[in-house]
Image (cartoon, helix red, strand yellow):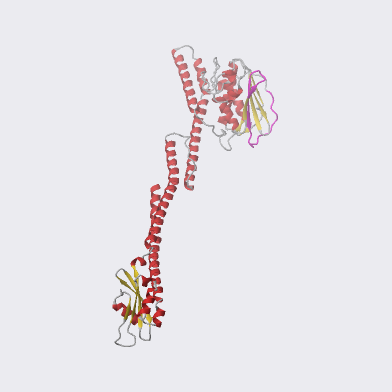
Amino acid sequence: MRWALVKVCLAVTAMVVVAFAVPLGIVVAEMARDRAFSDAERQAATIGPTLSITTDRTELETAVLATEPGVAGRMAVHVPAVGEPDGEPLEIGTRRAAPEDLETVRNSGRASISEVRGGFTLLQPTALGPDDIAVVEVFVPQDEVSKGVGTAWLVLAGVAVALIVGSVAVADRLGVRMVEPARRLAGAAHDLGEGRLGTRVAEEGPTELRSAAAAFNSMADQVIQLLANERELAADLSHRLRTPLTVLRLNAASLGESTAAEQTRAAVRQLEHEVDIIIRTAREQRPQTQGLNGGPGAGCDLSEVIRERMSFWSALAEDEGREVSLAGVDRTVRIPVARPELVAVLDALLGNVFRHTPEGAAFAVDVHHSDDAVIVLVSDAGGGIADPAAALARGGVGRDGAPGAGSAVGSTGLGLDIVRRAAESTGGDVRIGRSVLGGTEVSVRIGLDGHRRERGRRGHRVGRSRGRRGAARENTVPRLLRGKTPNL
């Protein structure tokens, strides 16, 4: 592209130079010729008054020598025989014109220019009488005709070369401005194709290339966003496998001591390990994605989902001797979070209680309502969290000081991150503090985002109660939990 632009500018400039320089050079040559012959006519006209007065040789010679061409020997006067028919014609100076040219001028009475050896002669007729015409001859050398033409042509040639060189230089610079952004764009596309997703292009150069660079950067951002969404989905789906894995683990624990039972438990442990690997891999370099509310119009009944998940987990709480308290879920509360995402949030919070608190530690779930938000409090009677800020950060410590993501105890740290992202997608937040039970209290504030919720009577505190065995059986959760559940 760069050399093509240079060639185009070179051709266009050359045509312009030829179109203007050649005619201008011809005009300069004509002007020099006209100047030389105009000067010769002026010199020849100075002899006219003398011829009209006298034809005496001595006086005519004096008049001729008084002119510049006469001194240089380039002027001659041809006077025909006057008075007597047999008189001799008078010639002063050196004749260079042919006799027939002189006769032609006498007969026509008009000046003419004849080409002779070494230049040109100007023949100027001057009337001496009714029938007698003298001719003044002025010789114009070739050098006088072309005087200054060579210099003018050299100047024109220099200007033409300067114009061509300048146009080539400008075209080259313009080509660089066009080619370099295009080359950077091509290189960035190559890098992006090789997997370097952080590649971006500076929006420089012509308008079209700036638009192409902006479109490329937007496309790269979309690619990263799509990949991030895929990783997020893989991590979330893998994390949701923790709950059925808990069931498998409990079922395996009820098989007793046999070779098949041990193989089953080993397979469950291996499956848990593989799920942990999937979650950690999906989390690597995963940027923050948009909200989890499933798009406009997605939502669910918070109270219904909490009652369902508490029924699920109450069987495990009964097996471990935990007291459970539930309040504020007797009214319908529509929130802008999809049901699967809310289930994942509750499973993550309640799973952390079972994992990071000792058996027998009580916990409670309270729901508080306001006009613009709903607050879900999950409290336990465990040992609390030493560093809440680190626990909320991905890769920070877990509940009761347990390590967070990437720790040696198998915790991925994704549970609280799922909770935080779900809350932030509605304009809410997550806070960790000290509960009235003596342990940790996780406060999840979910913004209603303009969704209308049904008004009902204010929720009441549910007394401490045991979970039902029937509910446990309906949810296929065995009553054989003896170890701690995985982190959800």
> How many numbered badges does the structure rendering display?
0
Report if residue 227 is visible in the image.
yes
The percent position of residue 214, horizontal first and vertical second, equals: 50, 42
The percent position of residue 374, horizontal first and vertical second, equals: 65, 30
- Return the residue found at the far front: 58
Confirm whether the magenta stretch covers residue 16. Answer: no
Residue at x-position 48% and y-position 38%: 200
- Against 208, residue 85 (above or below) is below
Q: Nearer the viewer, residue 291 or 100?
A: 100
Residue at x-position 45% and y-position 34%: 196
- Against 92, residue 462 (above or below) is above
Confirm whether the magenta stretch covers residue 457. Answer: yes
Q: In the displayed structure, does residue 436 sit left or right of residue 283?
A: right
Q: In the displayed structure, does residue 105 sit left or right of residue 459?
A: left
- Against 35, residue 129 (above or below) is below
The image quadrant of residue 293 is top right
Report if residue 471 is visible in the image.
no
Q: Where's the C terminus, which quadrant? A: top right
Secondary structure mostly seen in the magenta stretch: loop
The percent position of residue 13, horizontal first and vertical second, equals: 40, 55
Residue at x-position 48% and y-position 36%: 223
Provide the residue span drawn in magenta.
432-461
The image quadrant of residue 52 is bottom left
Q: Nearer the viewer, residue 402 or 203?
A: 203
- Return the residue found at the far top: 257
Residue at x-position 37% and y-position 61%: 150
